[in-house]
Amino acid sequence: MISGERVVARCRELAAITDVEGQTHRTFLSPAMQRCNARVGDWMRVCGASVVVDAAGSLRGRREGSGPGTVVIASHLDTVPNAGAFDGPMGVIIGVEVLELLRDRVLPFAIEIIGFSEEEGVRYGVPFIGSRAAVGTLGDDLLARRDAAGV
């Protein structure tokens, strides 16, 4: 059974991983974002998933199945400034819960949980960088953008 209490507790744990003390604020590629990805990646591994951060910075946990096809459960782990605890992370954490629920079962298809990067567009002013990369629509013009610090 999916544990609603664990989902809420994990979302609150992630809310405390922040770039700005006293707020929930995780910016794409920041140290807080890296710590968040590491924590969620640990939860994914416990459920039997292989975990990578892809070239666009999205966290991906995948458990292979016995046949073709993949079910994708995705959301985002970055935040707007002073965000709520549940916007974005809840979708990823529910995906982890699905992996936990099915951990001891042979699956007829793969399950991939994705925490897309830069969904909010806070750092570079362009939303959906991770999801654009996943579907092949991330243009070179977006790769040339700089943030406020020139990075």
Image (cartoon, rainbow, N blue to C red):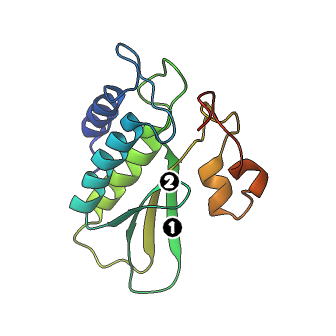
Q: Is residue 30 above or below residue 37?
A: above
Q: Position of residue 85 (x, y in %)?
A: 41, 26
Residue nearer the viewer, 123 or 2: 123
Q: Secondary structure at mark 2?
A: loop
Quarter location, residue 53: bottom left
Q: Secondary structure at mark 1?
A: strand
Q: Position of residue 139 (x, y in %)?
A: 76, 57
Residue found 50% across the figure and 33% down from its top: 27
Q: Position of residue 118 (x, y in %)?
A: 58, 42
Quarter residue 44 falls in: bottom left
| Residue shown at 31% from the left, 25% from the top | 16
Q: Amino acid at mark 2?
A: Ser
Q: Within 10 Å of the Cα at label 2, are there few (<14), some (14-19), or many (20+) other Cα atoms?
A: many
Q: Earlier in the sequence, mark 1 or mark 2?
A: 2
Residue highlighted by disc 1? 71
137, above or below 80, in the image: below
- Furthest residue toward top: 22
Q: Nearer the viewer, residue 63 or 104?
A: 63
x and y percent of residue 99 in the render? 32, 60
- Is the residue 107 above or below the residue 3 in the image? below
Q: Residue under circle 2?
A: 58
* Quadrant assignment for the C terminus: top right
- What residue is drawn where x is 42% and y is 39%? 90
Mark carried by residue 62: none
> Marks 1 and 2, how far apart in space?
17 Å
- Residue 59 placement, left or right of 104: right
x 40%, y 16%: residue: 23
Q: In the image, is residue 125 above or below residue 62?
A: above
